[in-house]
Image: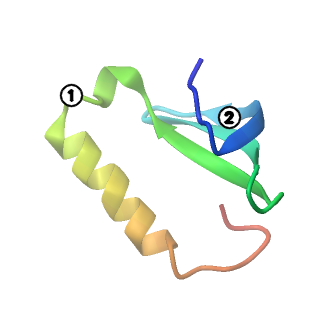
Amino acid sequence: MHKFEKYQNLRQINQGGTATVWRATNVDTNEVVALKILLEKLRDSADSRRAFFKEGAIMLPFDHPHVM
């Protein structure tokens, strides 16, 4: 299990080939968020980390309840 001090009530939503998505509550804002965590087996791969962060950067501008 992962430890995220800023989040509580973690519940796994889904897992794919590269990451696991968790539902959590931000303890500072009380906002419900989705946390996407790269699978442990891929964390040592520079290519996997680069693709993971690139996806995050692409998705950052989106603000829609159906986009995580």
Q: Residues within 10 Å of mark 1 (few under 14, many from 20)?
A: few
Residue 67 occupies quadrant: bottom right
Q: Position of residue 58 (x, y in %)?
A: 42, 73
Which residue is under mark 2? 14
Q: Position of residue 2 (x, y in %)?
A: 56, 24
Q: Residues within 10 Å of mark 2 (few under 14, many from 20)?
A: few
Which residue is under mark 1? 44
* Residue located farthest toward the left when viewing the structure as drawn: 46
Looking at the figure, which quarter contains the N terminus?
Answer: top right
Q: Position of residue 31 (x, y in %)?
A: 80, 60
Q: Position of residue 29 (x, y in %)?
A: 77, 63
Establish if 51 lies above or below 44.
below
Establish if 41 lies above or below 35.
above
Q: Residue at x 50, y 38 (%)?
A: 37
44 to the left or right of 58: left
Q: Residue at x 19, y 33 (%)?
A: 45
- Identify which residue, 28 or 45, lies in the foreground: 28
- Callout 2, which amino acid? Asn
Residue 12 image label: none
Establish if 31 lies above or below 59.
above
Q: Residue at x 26, y 41 (%)?
A: 48
- Callout 1, which amino acid? Asp
Q: Residue at x 53, y 82 (%)?
A: 61
Q: Mark 1 or mark 2: which comes first in sequence?
A: 2
Local secondary structure at mark 2: strand
Residue 22 occupies quadrant: top right
